[in-house]
Image (spheres, rainbow, N blue to C red):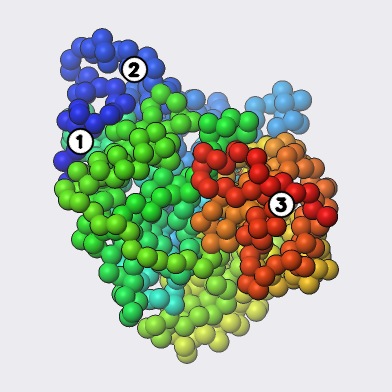
Amino acid sequence: MDDHSPRDDAETPTERVYETPPTERPITEAEAARAAKLAANEHIKIASGYLRGTLADGLLQHATGAISEDDGQLVKFHGMYLQDDRDLRAERTKKKLDKAYSFMIRLRIAGGVVTPKQWLVLDDIATTYANGTLRATTRQTFQYHGVIKSNLKRTMAAIDAALLDTIAACGDVNRNVMAATNPAQAGAHKAAYQLAKDISDSLLPKTNAWREIWLDGERVVGGEDAAEVEPVYGRTYLPRKFKTVVAVPPSNEVDIFAHDLGFIAILDKKNRVTGWNVTVGGGMGMTHGETDTFPRTADVMCFVEPADALKAAEAVMTVQRDWGNRTNRKNARLKYTIERYGLAAFRAEVEKRVGKKLADPKPFAFTGNGDRYGWVEGEDGRHHLTLYVPSGRIKDIEGGAQFLSGLRRIAEVHEGDFRLTGNQNVIIANVPAARKAEIDALVDEYGLTKGAGALRRNALACVALPTCGLALAESERYLPDLIGELEESLARHGLAEEEITIRSTGCPNGCARPFISEIGLVGRGPERYHLYLGAAFDGSRLSKLYREDVPAAEIRSTLDPLFADYAKGRKTGEHFGDYLIRAGHVARTTNGPDFHDRTGALKPAA
Ligand code: SRM
Ligand code: SF4
């Protein structure tokens, strides 16, 4: 399907190392020089035999709950991360014990759609092999935490039995593809879901490694030729992770500007999809103190007819495959490739690979990036109920909502499907009018929530401690309390029902997309956060660093004067992020490269 395999495209400004795969010939001097500069992960991929490494053997090593360092990188391509319980680290070190190792497992669920039957299996796995919770993520899928090494294969077999998998949920590949859930626009949602599924399937790695390692599948013999084994990815896959989403305006619930590749549905008057605007080069991750790393909102590059969408997706991904930086992983995402080569050159190369000139983008408008809670009726007369799930953690809360048990009971009677949203919430979708009362009764019985206060329902928190190895501060366990404090403050200023987006992450990797949230808290160290302000309500503009290293105990008092000022000075309908810029509290960020530029307005609040 791809005319531009990793080997025969020498005239592009590529950073590829091997012009042809060096399996059966000596490596040239030029190749050796290029290889010496490669990031360590590139060598791991090359030596892995298409993502196998020593994983199968490592699983048999019972003396440790961990796996080797190289396999730790490879296992990501299989949808897993080696982690340890950081709450127990200090105590175990004191006792000279190994870390409390376990694995996080992430599923691949294109568009976030699962059947009730699959839900029941996923629930079973959570209580049998994981820590008793299902975690809905910011990219419309589920994660398990706390699966120990000896249970990995059993867990994967159970996932496979539910006709699901974890292939390419993490790693340097096209990952889980998100799609607008937007149940009210039934036709457009169908088209968005179909495109997400088609992209997810067509850009899936083709190696048989996943089936071999986790399901004891047969090794396919003779499969060493990259053109046969991985016709699109080649031996070294992509320089870095690659994320794709499909949006349906007016909702930007998938946060299209935060992703490498996006498709925005262009609708006619009857809400039918006439084609897609293509966005490229969004991303959130950066490193504190390193200004050559930055978040960036995606550019709206062109418009494609429905028949060209899949080709365009593959072309964008393969240009990144060939042009992306393979020597420095901190500079390897598509956003940096586009900054380096320019959008015009990037678009020209995509057009070359699609085989035609592509039209300029068509007009579109987003109104926000949150979910609609409660019941909505779709154009097709089916009903859909969006439930608010705090930080996406589906569990039974002591003395509170019984999310795990309640959703399980609903799955037992529900005949439609479930949809995960990119805001970590769950939709009970496709309910006939006659069955609404039954679902409502279960929602009430288990204390499930159809909404929350304005700030809370517009909040996202990443996982962070205790499982995330990169967390510098708390997030999921901290944001709910902070929101309680801020709600009091907002209420005092008459802003209790004001829609303001707030997101927190335990580090600047940005897993809850904090840099496109009107209030963004980014972990700097234990109980300390950088405070970012001034993003657009619909997720289309980045924020700016407002205060560095704010102690958790001072966040409320830092924001309170800004709420007071907003309450007094805002125009009708003016969002908090826009107001802070107009009133001169923070400077506007144009896009990634000027994210760190703090010159301009920084007026202290009265
Ligand atoms: Fe993420 C790494 C959790 C969405 C940017 N992310 C991680 C790891 C795997 C930590 C690690 O590498 O050891 C976290 C596991 C924590 C845990 O214990 O579960 C983690 N990321 C998550 C999730 C679960 C957050 C959540 O609370 O829901 C999200 C899972 C999404 C999914 O289902 O696939 C999640 N991560 C995101 C997003 C949001 C998005 O894509 O819309 C981003 C920002 C967008 C982007 O990619 O730029 C994001 N995660 C990162 C990065 C920084 C990437 C970069 O370009 O610099 C890392 C670290 C890395 O890749 O080196 C990371
Ligand atoms: Fe972990 Fe940082 Fe992502 Fe939060 S933002 S889950 S702390 S990597």
Q: In the structure shown, which secondary structural element does the residue marked by tag 1 occupy? A: loop
Examine the image and state in which quarter residue 358 appears.
bottom left
Q: Is disc 2 in contact with disc 3, using a CB cutoff of under 8 Å?
A: no
Q: Residue beneath label 1, please?
A: 5
Q: Residue beneath label 2, please?
A: 35
Residue 391 x/y as whole percent? 62, 57
Q: Name the side, left or right, on which 392 lies relative to 456.
A: left
Q: Amino acid at mark 1?
A: Ser
Is disc 2 surrounded by few (<14), some (14 to 19) or many (20+) residues within 10 Å? some
Query: Residue drawn at (46%, 53%), measured in percent from left and top?
Result: 257
Q: Name the side, left or right, on which 568 lies relative to 275.
A: right
Query: Residue drawn at (82%, 48%), measured in percent from left and top?
Result: 554
Is disc 1 surrounded by few (<14), some (14 to 19) or many (20+) residues within 10 Å? some
Query: Residue drawn at (22%, 47%), measured in percent from left and top?
Result: 351
Labelled disc at residue 585? 3
Q: Is residue 559 visible?
A: yes
